[in-house]
Image (cartoon, coloured by chain):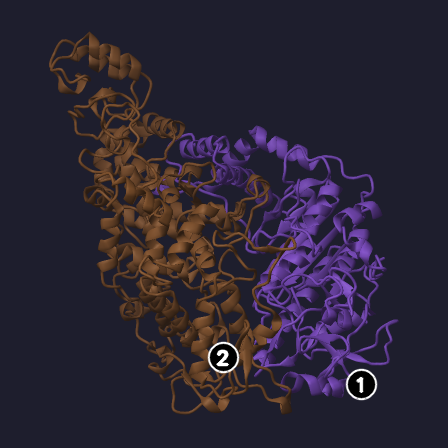
Amino acid sequence: MKNNKINRRKFLKWNLATALGSSSLLQVLDGISTAHAASINDEYKALVCVFLFGGNDSFNMIAPKNNSAYNQYANVRQGIAINRNELLAISPQTYDDGNTYGFHPIMTEIQQLFNQNKLSVIANVGTLAEPLTKAQYEAKSKKIPPQLFSHADQQDLWMKANTDTINPYGWAGRMTDFLYPNPSLSPLPAVNLTTWQANLWQAGIKHSMYEIPADGVEPLYFPWHAGDYAMEQAYRDLYQLGTNDDHILLSQFAETQQRSDSLTEIINNALKDAPTFATKFPNNNRLGKQLEMVAKLIAIRDNLDSNITRQIFFVGLEGWDTHDNQTAKHSQQLGHLSKSLNAFYAALEEQGISNQVTTFTASEFGRSMTPNNNGTDHGWGGHNLVMGGSVNGGDIFGTMPKLQQNSPDAVEDGRIIPTSSVEQYAATMANWFGLSSSEINSVFPNLHRFPVKNLGFLS
Amino acid sequence: MINKSSPKPVTFFLLLILGFPFFTYAATDTDADGIPDTRDNCIDIANSNQYDSNNDGFGNACDADLDNNGLVSFADLNLFKSAFNTNNPDADFDGNGSVSFADLNIFKQLFNKPPGPAGSSPGSNLSRADASRFLAQSTYGPTYSDILHLVELGNYEDWLDEQFELSPTYHRPRIKTPVYDSRGELTGQYGRLDAWWDIAVSSKDQLRQRVAFALSEIMVISDFSDPLETHRDTVAEYYDILVKNSFGNFRDLLEDITLSPAMGVYLSMLGNDKPDPSTNRRADENYARELLQLFSIGLVELNLDGSTKKSRNKPIPTYNQTDIENLARIFTGWSWNLDYYTGGAWAWWDNHQVLIQPMVAFSEHHDFNEKTFLGNSFPADQSTRQDLDQALDIIFNHPNVGPFISKQLIMRLVTSNPSSAYVKRVAKIFNNDGQGTRGNMKAVVKAILMDQEARTSSSNHFGKLREPLLRLTHIWRAFKAKGSKPIAPWMPSFVNYVAFHYYWPESEFSQAPLRSPSVFNFFRPDFSPAGKIKKANLVAPEFQISSESRIQKLYSALITLIFDDGFHEYVPAKLNLTTETNLMKKPGELINRLDLILTSGNMSDGMRNILLNYINTNRSEINDDKRLVRDLIILITTSAEYAIQR
């Protein structure tokens, strides 16, 4: 029996050797090394999207702290309002609407990052077809995004950054199509990486994404008793056969198997050189582990492909749909977010690369100002966090809404109309990422409807 | 009822108009020998005598594979030579009693090809491959004996009637674990998972269970949520609601899930209190919204064929935010079945009877003001119960329910991209089962499975990626898996009974029963993976949990589970491969059998050749037929041809 135990080292050697020998992989590598768009330079940059699935109640993530604004906030939010004296005070660099603001009491790390100018708040972002006022919403005189308040649909619109198209691609994928316009074989797995799941955001026409679970990718192993790796060979022969099948689902599955086989070893071998960070990531939540993997992948990026100067990462955390028992649940979620982002930033600083990585939050919607029994319901606009050495930190960008009864900023019983659109938020990052203004206009075809093309939070 | 006798033309026409699908395809007879292909043991060569001397299902007229290795080769030619001029029945292809030059001519035509193709055994209207395809759609996976049974019945309808008659197997009563462990802690989901695997693999009421599993992916709750995690009875009772109503009426299903405390907790209708202007409190919209969006009518108005209705080129929303707010108010005032009110989810978690009983109304927490929902007025002062009944009637009778639910059930059982005509045929049955009843689930299930598209489509996008969990149930069923006493030291002592003991499949399979990451299931019905599927405007929901790295995880797990001879110490199931190992003497027949059970007769010649070559090249070195059988099962179940259920 012992003889039949897998000889792991021998297996790895086989797999890499055969994988490298395969023409398909050479094509993949060839694709990776394809020249990038002229507009981007050779300095490495990465974008990291932290998607908060379920709808983050960001009006409790950052809330007004001065008496008059706080009292209006507490009056509208009632039992779920944060205690005023517990809010973690901040002093924005430039933003001044006459009120002061503070972070949720559990977000001490976020407060510190803000105070160190490493993080800013982008106020009241959401899906918009064009600028919209309360009167226009109620008169239906302007375009309103479809399927407001639906999780799945608003997630899609955030990922597409385009409210009136059926185009099934995401803005990260479309950006990549411009950055690397001539892949000889799609996808370029080194550009779009996700630790969460396949997602719409990273789907491009020429490019797709590669999923790396937070705990890594196990190589596929066979009992290799049949000499000369005959089973591996038969497995590979079978998916090769499948790639030529007329059946669309069948051949795409076979192609996925083929990529899987080639890329797992590349990723795993590359990850062997990943440093051990002095920073300890929180290990009691899925976000910390994912961001740790992203920090490692950034560290070993040259092992994946030294020609790549742009990378896009997607991480996600569920559990934000706080219809009930919000006070306890939301605090726990925000705690995970605060500690995980903080650890991630520290790990980037360890690598000396924190200026080159911008991390931002996204969530399908904010929540209703008004509470139900002990939670909140689906809203619309919401605040987001942007973190990185290139962020104009310690500030608030955009416009904070009025959280009060009968707010001029609210419709449908307490849902806030966004004042910055997803495409303004995204285009600001695309600009930092190196896309030209014409490329940005292609990726975000509705951007022209908004007077401000760049929210100014990155430099 | 099918194919047994030709229906009279008038009836035939009438049935066509009514949308009954099963007379619309005529039996084809490729070789015009009077035997329809579905039961012709040699489809391409005329053989009205159906002579099959070795009884392998391939008529002699197209079976020159004398060494039964799956391919007619020089070895067979040598065998033929030695049989020449004798009366060896296997080499007597034309069945005239002697092996002659006529037989040699037939041999030449069959050279370098696998035997067949063949339909079913004579006397049945169904081929074995047809039966296997049907059972892949309607059970937790075809087995050889189930295939033979269906072929023997000779038609699908009798099989469906058999299944409809079986009494349901409920999950909660099958839980064997105690409520508390020896330290007084709740034992959690162990017992529920054991019951689920056991029922999936062994229960007789396979169709009901398979439909219940499909419903569990549409009307989602999850034990991957704080309050439900520890309370397996509440979760299992919810599953039993699905089991019960799989063959019931959709209106009852809606009501039962709405009042289920598991759903009440999961989507916070339990404890949903009437609005209170003094504290600015609104009703909780959670259940109201997801009931409409996910469990019944969807977001936009649909045509009967499932396509989106348009007005001025725009989809028409089925409801607006005001409807949601009103429905949320309609649904106020429900909580645990106690004689006093508690809005809290788990205040009474020690009372295990209450945990499984439907929620009850508490009028002091109900909103008695007038409401309007989807254009219907709810007069003031209706009772809590009256409001709920009226709302569920309105939802149930919404024209979207038929196409919305029918399409999703088709996608879970048969194909990811059903034609609009297929959806329409099933939705019609949902709307009226022919006896004037709406929402008759038996009729809907029958319409889905008997449809011509389910039965005969061979388009290049028909079918679906097999769900990871259903791959394992299939393998365990096909090869008569047996569980055992606890096998791993880390397992708690309270599972000290025979079972599969496979508790966390989600880590490798991205799936576990009632354990999705959110109410949006493990994958979304509209997921379209980047690549040629997306370019063809098709969807393939299961691809959402089948990325490159997830395939590796899944396959490593499957290989471990199949290759269980000590390679890994703790494997939850032992496969019984005796029949298959004995068949190794005739590799071609073994592969035919595996093709029949696993790939429903869809295996390509190219794949067959790869497998035969694997056997021929490695058999002497491996020198262990049972192991070789395992290798074949691994190679087939990790292949793309198996991955897509067609």
The residue drawn where x is 50% and y is 87% is B366
Chain identifier of the purple chain: A
Residue B331: mark: 2
Q: Mark 1 near mark 2, Cβ–Cβ under 8 Å?
A: no
Q: Nearer the viewer, residue A268 or B398?
A: B398
Q: Is residue B260 above or below residue A74?
A: above
Taking the image as drawn, is residue B564 in sight?
no
Which residue is drawn at the image coordinates 17% and 20% (left, top)? B90
Q: Quadrant of residue A86?
A: bottom right
Q: Nearer the viewer, residue B540 or A388?
A: B540
Please tell me whether mark 1 or mark 2 is closer to you in this view: 2
Element on which disc 2 rests: loop
Q: Quadrant of residue B192?
A: bottom left
Give the residue type that dot 2 points to.
Answer: Phe
| Image mark 2: chain | B
- Disc 1 target residue: A66
* Amino acid identity at mark 1: Asn
Q: Report the front residue among A205 and A179.
A: A205
Residue A44: tell me if it is visible. Answer: yes
Colour-to-chain, brown: B
Look at 17% across and 11% down and name the residue there.
B82
Pointer 1 chain: A
The residues tagged by marks 1 and 2 sit, at their Cα atoms, a distance apart of: 38 Å
Horizontal and vertical percent for residue A240?
A: 49, 31
Q: In this image, A134 relative to A80: left or right?
A: right
> Could you tell me residue B414's position as x and y percent?
40, 48
- Tell me the quarter of the image containing the C terminus of chain B: top left
Mark 1 surroundings: few (<14), some (14-19) or many (≥20) residues within 10 A: some
